[in-house]
Amino acid sequence: MLKFAGGAFALFMATALSATAATVDVQMLNHGTHRYSFEPAVVYIHSGDSVHFVPTDKGHNVQSIPGMTPDGAEPINVPFSQEKTVQFTKSGLYGYKCLPHVSMGMVGLIVVDNANNEAQARKVTFYGKAKQRFDELFQDVDSKKGK
């Protein structure tokens, strides 16, 4: 009987935790705030929450950017023109891109609990519109610190 009670408690806790987890939609767009963009471009969530990537406009994918993912975290990989929900269980900052449109500034950031790897992520080199866009996104992250 005690074994069953422990299992029931574990099931209850798992259900309770999943019931409080949030999911944020991120649209993949040809035209939005910027041409070729993820909207919202910066997402703030908590550990256990998810991001639902929606190919509102086809021809986009989502890939983690090497050096812009917390140590030990699973990379983001959403195939072209496909919808996918990704759960984030490790705190930190995640940078991602649309492979064919990164040079046009189609990049985004996800901040899970805090941006404890921000200094490492800022060392990644980008050029042109991708650099300009990341500068804007990091300004948003900086404005939220301490809030």
Image (tube, helix red, strand yellow):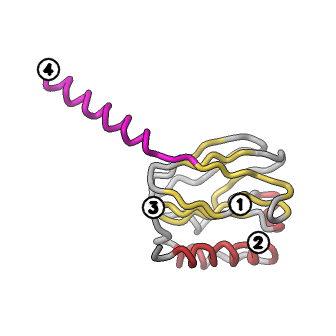
**Disc number for residue 130:** 2
Mark 4 belongs to which amino acid?
Answer: Met
Where is 87 relative to 133, above or below?
A: above
Q: Nearer the viewer, mark 2 or mark 4?
A: 4
The residue tagged 1 is 97
**Viewer-nearest residue: 7 or 144:** 144
Residue 1 is tagged as 4
Distance from label 3 to label 2 (Cα)?
24 Å
The disc label shown at residue 91, or none: 3
- The amino acid pointed to by label 1 is Lys
Mark 4 vs mark 1, foreground winner is 4
Report if the CB atoms under discs 1 and 3 are less than 8 Å apart.
no
Rounded to the nearest angstrom, the CA distance separating label 4 from label 3 is 37 Å
Q: Earlier in the sequence, mark 2 or mark 4?
A: 4
Residue drawn at x 45%, y 76% is: 146
First reached walking from the N terminus: tag 3 or tag 2: 3
First-in-chain label (2 vs 1): 1
Mark 1 element type: strand
Say which quarter of the image contains residue 83: top right
Q: Measured along the vertical axis of the image, is residue 28 above or below residue 81? A: below
Instruction: Tell me which residue sits at (82%, 65%) in the image.
Output: 34
Pointers 3 and 2 in contact (C-beta within 8 Å): no
Element under label 4?
A: loop
Position in image of residue 64 (x %, y %): 63, 58
- Mark 1 crowd level (few <14, some 14–19, many ≥20, 10 Å Cα): many
Q: Is residue 94 magenta?
A: no
* Magenta-drawn segment: 1-23
Q: Looking at the image, is mark 4 or mark 1 earlier in the sequence?
A: 4
Q: Tag 3, which secondary structure?
A: loop
Q: Badge 2: how crowded within 10 Å, few (<14), some, or many (20+)?
A: many
Residue 41: mark in rendering: none
Horizontal and vertical percent for residue 81? 78, 43
